[in-house]
Amino acid sequence: MRLVIWLVLLFIAAVVAALTLGNNDGLASFYWAGWRVDISLNLFLLLLVASCFALVTAIQAIEALTTLPKRAREWRLSQRERSAQLALREALAELFGARFSRAQKAAQKALNIQSATPELAADQSFMALAHLLAAASAHRLQDRRHRDEQLTRALELARRAGGARAQEDGARLLAAEWALDDRDAARALSVLGELAPGVARRTQALRLRLQASRLAQQPLDALRTARLLAKHQAFSKVAAQGLLRSLAFEALDGARDVDQLRSIWHQLDPADRRDPLVAARAAQCAGQLGAPDDGRGWLRPFFDDLAELQSDERAALATALVPVLAGCGPDWLQRLESAQSRFPRERSLAYALGHGLAERQLWGKARLMLETVAEDATMPSPPRRRSWLALAALAEQEGDEVRRARCYEAAARLP
């Protein structure tokens, strides 16, 4: 079919040429030094076209001949660039394949090719990436000296290259990650502090900062970073809540005196201070440091509205209240009695009420509540032991040595 079409087009061209050129009677005359040459116009046009074609062909041939060295140099340059690119891809593939020695050799081969070619050595981004691959391979091989050298070189090249900002940010993030692998929290925090503000807010940078802050035992900084990660939805809701609580616990447990505990409490985020479990831990720390008034003040907002809390949260608050009941006023007895009447089946509230009654020296009611808690096998051992000890102290005040000995024995039997 294609052959038929070409034949038809050839016939059409022949017919058009015959109709156009067959009736052309024109002449082209040339004069030179008294001579005259006449040729047909058709022949002149054909000769003109042929001459132009020959001239263009000659010019192209001369140009190809004169530019041959340049084209040969460009070909050699493209071959070397291709070899460098192949070596870089090989290094990347070997690194992903956990063949770190081969990856390091391939990256070094790419660097050697680039360095030996002045035209390619100007590509700072390529050089920085190759140094990063070599540094990553050295890190996997535990060669810290070579890793640091390659990383420093990559950072220098990335800073000199105007468009290699991504390589510089990647190098700093890798440096922070490697510092964490070396358990060097100070270096990791220093490297992360050099990041640009936009890069420092990325999820990976925040994850590294969280790990570095925890490694450096800076729970407040870690808590702020974890809250940013939670806002970025880097964790599930349950995992974020658990992590924030554990970091708040670490910060509160690290207080060495009452002033430091108060400072840490006020530095916590308002959302953390509204968490019943965090407030319970703060009250426990206040009781251990001899500041019961502060502990009760932190727990008071929760006891004013216990209905909105879960049973485990109410239990934690009641358990945390007992160590800070020293010096409590009658208003706390009203709160505890109201809570006990609203939730009569929750032994933890009875436990707190019993110790509150004992603190106010209402021994009859206190003894009834404490015995109920101490004999309840479903209660945890620490509250039961504390209740038995309180009953023993009450028996000692009443002069009942037999009951006192029985209470001490029961407390000693608890695990």
Image (spheres, helix red, strand yellow):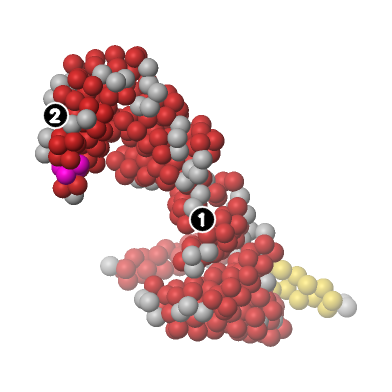
**How far apart are labels 2 and 1 at the CA level?**
46 Å
The quarter of the image holding the N terminus is bottom left
- The residue range painted magenta reads 407-411
Q: Amino acid at mark 1?
A: Ala
- Specify the label residue 372 is tagged with: 2
For image coordinates 16% across by 47% down, the residue present is 413
Describe residue 368's horizontal placement relative to residue 15 as left or right. left
For image coordinates 59% across by 46% down, the residue present is 197
Residue 375 drawn above or below residue 135: above
Describe residue 387's horizontal placement relative to residue 208 as left or right. left
Dot 2 crowding, Cα within 10 Å, few <14, some 14–19, many 20+: some
Q: Amino acid at mark 2?
A: Thr
Q: Is residue 171 magenta?
A: no
Q: Nearer the viewer, residue 57 or 134?
A: 134
Q: Is residue 409 magenta?
A: yes
Q: Nearer the viewer, residue 163 or 82?
A: 163
Residue 18, visible in the rendered structure: no
Residue 75 at x, y percent in the picture: 59, 82
Residue 91 drawn above or below residue 229: below
Residue 318, visible in the rendered structure: yes
Residue 373 drawn above or below residue 239: above
